[in-house]
Amino acid sequence: MPQHINYLFKQELGISPTALLHLEHCKRAFLLIRNDRLSVKEAAERTGFCDAYHFSKVFKKTYGFPPGLITRFFKPQS
């Protein structure tokens, strides 16, 4: 049954439930790193990832660049 729910979810939204959760967590982490100047490790912890390594892998898969580049290329917004 869970596989069928996942299938229907992806059919309707075009993204799996896990990918959607990762996207939302990565968006929040991006803002924490850019605006609050948190470290990658702190942002990973605050957004529910078990460790910074796993977070970095998911973030790079989601955005195409590692989270360590955020402070280098994105200015904080108020």
Image: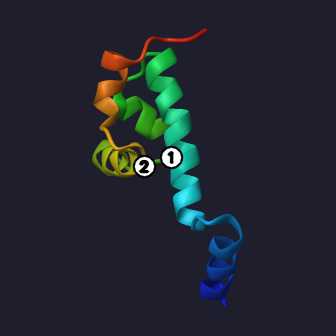
Question: Residue 76's x, y, as percent?
Answer: 49, 11
The disc label shown at residue 48, or none: 1
Q: Residues within 10 Å of mark 2 (few under 14, many from 20)?
A: some
Residue placed most toward the observer, 14 or 45: 14
The structure residue drawn at horizontal position 41% and vertical position 17%, both measured from the top left corner, is 74
Q: Considering the numbered disc 2 on the image, is that residue within a helix, a strand or a loop?
A: helix
Give, as a three-letter code, the residue at label 1: Gly
Residue topped by disc 2: 62
The structure residue drawn at horizontal position 68% and vertical position 65%, both measured from the top left corner, is 13
Q: Considering the numbered disc 1 on the image, is that residue within a helix, a strand or a loop?
A: loop
Q: Residues within 10 Å of mark 1 (few under 14, many from 20)?
A: few
Task: Report the side of 17 relative to 48 (left or right).
Answer: right
Give, as a three-letter code, the residue at label 2: Thr
Q: Is 25 located above or below residue 37 in the figure?
A: below
- Tell which circle, 1 or 2, labels the residue nearer the N-terminal end: 1
> Which numbered disc, 1 or 2, marks the residue closer to the eye?
2
Q: Image quadrant for the N terminus?
A: bottom right
Q: Is 50 located above or below residue 28 in the figure?
A: below
